[in-house]
């Protein structure tokens, strides 16, 4: 991919290759056992939509929010992670064929460089997968086993003991990271840090973002903002819960501009520090 983007912030303003833009951040080096580096990435429209809702309340990601350039950056962020934090809802959607498989690195010819990059930079070829789920009711794809990936299931202490037992019986480790049925950000990150995992990439939805942000565990937010007003009366945003106040105050770290997509409009790739 020869595409370039313009750096708008910080100065100087200059064109830069898209390819390698986020790999150069070396996020895998920013965490320590005491302070793991936790980052998330979301796509939104100018009017703040991250998904639209159908009449039956199901939500979906509109095609105009996704672009090849954004996906490349998503994969570059993924390549720098010790572990990927996903959730039960994603695995149900994956199994139903509604979403593609984003659990493995370098699966196509054009992304093989990312697998090589990981190995060259001392990371395991494939990241650990952490599945956050209160229901514990989801299928796991065979591809996790095929890639020899460690998969941890995170839930709360009040999760259904029968379901906890079912997962353990078939060889999966279930970790309790919350007092009720839900996972809480603080305990989750602490448990993962004790296992030596230092860079966590959140590839879940707004609920897990909320969990991590409220517990002060999110280090950086990446956001792609496509230049479109999406409208739609039913929609999802990044922040489904109560007001954040100062917790939600973010500091811009970088801003890049791609004038070409989606549909010849444009998009910004923004990077914000959360806990300074
Ligand atoms: N534009 C974007 O960048 C972007 C990014 C992500 C998602 N989305 C879209 O936004 C919509 C909603 O997102 P979503 O469905 O991914 O996620 P979500 O509504 O935030 O969470 C859904 C599932 O995650 C699990 N979960 C969340 N928080 C948890 C916690 N604290 N403890 C335990 N489990 C927890 C639950 O699984 P169990 O039911 O198994 O308990 C829950 O059903 C979807 O349409 C999605 O496509 C957009």
Image: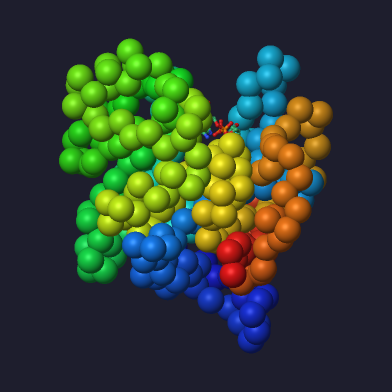
Q: Is residue 265 visible?
A: no
- Which residue does the image show at 59% across and 37% down from the upper left? 207
- Which residue does the image show at 58% across and 64% down from the upper left? 275
Please say if 232 is above or below 267.
Answer: above
Quadrant of ligand 1 in image: top right
The answer to which image quadrant residue 1 occupies is bottom left
**Image quadrant in which the C terminus is located:** bottom right
Q: Residue 245 or 237: which is nearer the viewer?
A: 245
The image's colour scheme reads rainbow
Q: Is residue 99 left or right of residue 164?
A: right
Q: Residue 94 or 211: which is nearer the viewer?
A: 211
Q: Position of residue 150 (x, y in %)?
A: 24, 41
Q: Position of residue 168 (x, y in %)?
A: 24, 24
Q: Residue 106 or 68: which is nearer the viewer?
A: 106
Q: Position of residue 249 (x, y in %)?
A: 71, 60
Q: Residue furthest front?
A: 179
Q: Is residue 184 visible?
A: yes
Please say if 226 is above or below 17.
Answer: above
């Amino acid at each position: 991919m020869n595409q370039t983007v313009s750096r708008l912030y910080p100065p100087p303003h200059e064109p830069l290759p898209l390819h390698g833009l986020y790999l150069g951040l070396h996020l895998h080096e920013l965490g320590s056992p005491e302070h793991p580096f936790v980052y998330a990435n979301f796509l939104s429209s100018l009017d703040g939509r991250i998904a639209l809702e159908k009449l039956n309340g199901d939500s979906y990601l509109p095609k105009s929010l996704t672009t090849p350039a954004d996906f490349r950056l998503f994969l570059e962020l993924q390549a720098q992670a010790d572990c990927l934090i996903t959730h039960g809802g994603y695995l149900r959607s994956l199994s139903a064929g509604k979403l593609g498989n984003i659990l493995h690195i370098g699966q196509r010819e054009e992304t093989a460089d990312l697998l090589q990059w990981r190995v060259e930079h001392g990371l395991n070829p494939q990241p650990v997968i952490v599945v956050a789920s209160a229901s514990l009711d989801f299928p796991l794809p065979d591809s996790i086993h095929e890639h020899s990936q460690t998969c941890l299931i995170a839930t709360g202490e009040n999760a259904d003991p029968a379901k906890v037992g079912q997962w353990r019986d078939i060889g999966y480790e279930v970790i309790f990271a919350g007092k009720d049925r839900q996972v809480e950000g603080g305990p989750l990150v602490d448990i993962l840090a004790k296992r030596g995992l230092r860079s966590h990439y959140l590839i879940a939805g707004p609920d897990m973002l909320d969990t991590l942000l409220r517990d002060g565990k999110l280090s950086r937010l990446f956001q792609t903002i496509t230049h479109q007003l999406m409208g739609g009366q039913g929609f999802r945003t990044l922040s489904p819960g109560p007001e954040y106040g100062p917790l939600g105050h973010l500091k811009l770290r970088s801003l890049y501009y791609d004038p070409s997509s989606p549909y010849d409009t444009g998009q910004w790739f923004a990077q914000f520090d959360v806990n300074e």
